[in-house]
Every structure is written in structure tokens, then in C-alpha cells.
Amino acid sequence: MVTASRVKGFIFVGLLPALLIYSVFVLVPIIWSAYYGFYDWKGIGAAKFIGFDNYIEALSHPIFWRALKNNLIIVGASIFGQVPIALILSLVLWKNTFFHRFIRSAVFMPMVVASVVIGIMWGYIYHPQIGILNFVLEQVGLGSWIRDWLGDPKVNMYSVSIPIIWANIGPYLILFIAAIQNISSEVEDAAKIDGATKGKRLFYVVIPMIWDTIKVALVLCISGSLTSFDLIYVMTGGGPAQSTELLATYMYNNTFEIFRYGYGSAVSTLIIIISMGLVLGSQVLMKRKS
């Protein structure tokens, strides 16, 4: 007879390899990065202990706060763009017909395309001279809207938010579809018998039953948005004049461009702290009474 302790032992043994890999490649680098945040280190040679100077410098630097503001724009665009669009599409495409599978594959396709390719493609779309966006605006009589979408500090952060949203809808779509398909048909039938309309079934049956999945999606959305790097780096490099600088690009430039590894480690630690704060805040706001 299999006892509860033996079952727990099997679970622990099964999870142990994944925990070891996660510890080596995630937890240890995080601790190591936080440790070097207290040092003035150029990547080679001796590291000089300077206490909290790197953290104080980062928190007092205007570019750091500009990068944080830009990151919050990306976070907001992702939360109110990726998650709602993916949820709406999942409600439309959850059936397992050929047509629905084809559309789901098309929506998921950007996830299997290299981020560099997506960045270059959208860079051409936004190009002020040969970009298709300005061409279409001119053809439909909206020539006054034509501008340098990636070079104008007034709109460039909103411009780069669109490809980030477009490229990351797929995973949340699959996540929501899986949650919807796991809802028991008996619950739906009971709601229909009680006379609930489609709108009421959506708000009183479907969404409450996938609420935990929505919370998970928001956690992934926030953490992924705060570490956004590749698309921004390819399209703008953080410019012009650091107007599209994000925390990740700010950390990268300080670490690998001017070789301030200690300062870059401090910035990366601050990114983790900010990410944890936003995630905890979102979970508190979304907490529901059972």
C-alpha cells in the first residue's frame, strides 16, 4: 500500500532535478548579482567593497527613473493589451475545430520567430521614409499623422509597446484556452438551465473559474515586461537620447558597454525587487474572497 509519505517522497525525487537546475541557473546568479552590487568591479581584477553606493547612485540617477517610467508604460501596455486580447480570443477560439486551431497557430506564430527578426520587421514598418505605416497614412488622407514613430520622444514608447503586445499574446491565449476547456460542461449546463444568458455565464461562471489562471498570467506579464530587452534593443537601442531606455537596457549598457559590472549588478537586483513589489501588489489587488 502506498502511503502519503512515500507519495511525497516520489514527488520530491521527481522535482529534485528541476529544482537543482533552477537553483544553479536562476537562484545562484540572483544571489551572486546582489553580492556584487556592493562592490566596484569591472569584471576583471579585484573588487572593491563600497557598500550601498551602487544602489544609492542608481536611485539618484535620472536615467534610472526615466527607464523605470518607460518600463511601467510597457507593463501597463502589456497588462491592458496582452491579457485582455488573449482572453477575448480564447473565448472565441477555444473550440477544437480546424479553423480555430489554424487561427490559434497564427496568433502563436510570433513566439516561434526570433525577437531580432520581429524587431527588424517592425523597425521597417515604423521607418519614417520607407515604412508601410506612414505610406498607409498618406494614402488614406492622414498625412498629418506621419512622423518618425521611433525617433519622436512623444510617441516612441507607445510605438514600441505595440510589437511587444503583438509578439506575446500567444502564450496567454494558450493558457486561457486550456483553463476554459477544463471547465466542467455540467457547470455550463446548470447555468443554462437556470436561465443565465451568455453574458452572465461569462462573468459569473467562466471568469470566476479561470480567475487563478488570470492571476498567473498577470504575474508572467509583469515579470516579463520588466525584463523586456531584445525588441527595444533591436528597434531603438534605448535611444534617441535614451528616450526609450528600459531598466534592462540601462543595466546592459552600464555592464557591458562601460564595464561597470558592480553597478550593473545593483541595477539588476533593483529590477528584481521592483518586479516582486509589482507582482505582490497585483496579487493583493486581485485577491478574492472564496
Image (cartoon, rainbow, N blue to C red):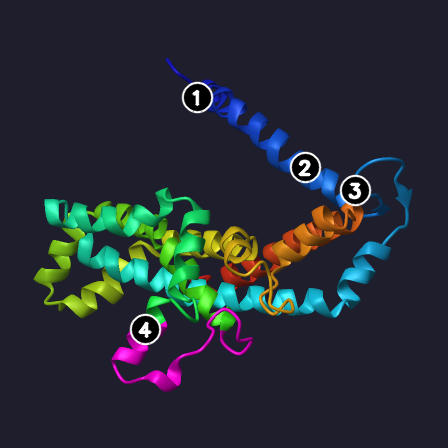
Question: Label 4 belongs to which residue?
Answer: 135
Identify which amino acid the numbered label 1 is placed on: Val
Lower sequence index among marks 1 and 3 = 1
Q: Quadrant of the C terminus?
A: bottom left
Disc 4 residue type (three-letter): Phe
Mark 1–mark 3 Cα distance, whole angstroms, equals 38 Å
The residue labelled by disc 2 is 29
The reply, left or right, for residue 233 in relation to residue 140 is right
Contact between labelled residues 3 and 2, with CB atoms less than 8 Å apart: no
Magenta-drawn stretch contains 150: yes
Earlier in the chain: of badge 2 and badge 3, it is: 2
Identify which residue, 146 or 59, lies in the foreground.
146
Disc number lying in front (1 or 4): 4
Say which label, 2 or 1, has the lower sequence index.
1
Which of the 4 image quarters holds residue 142? bottom left
Q: Residue furthest front?
A: 129
Residue under numbered circle 3: 35
Q: Which residue: 50% across, 58% down?
A: 235
The residue tagged with tag 1: helix, strand or loop? helix
Residue at 12% x, 49% y is 99
Q: Return the x and y of residue 191 as percentages of the image width and height.
A: 15, 60
Q: Earlier in the sequence, mark 1 or mark 4?
A: 1
Q: Check disc 2 and give the amino acid type.
A: Pro
Q: Which residues are magenta?
A: 134-155
Please indicate, yes or no, whether residue 97 appears anywhere in the rendered image.
Answer: no
Residue 49 horizontal/vertical position (percent)? 90, 45
184 lies above or below 67: above
Residue matched to label 1: 7
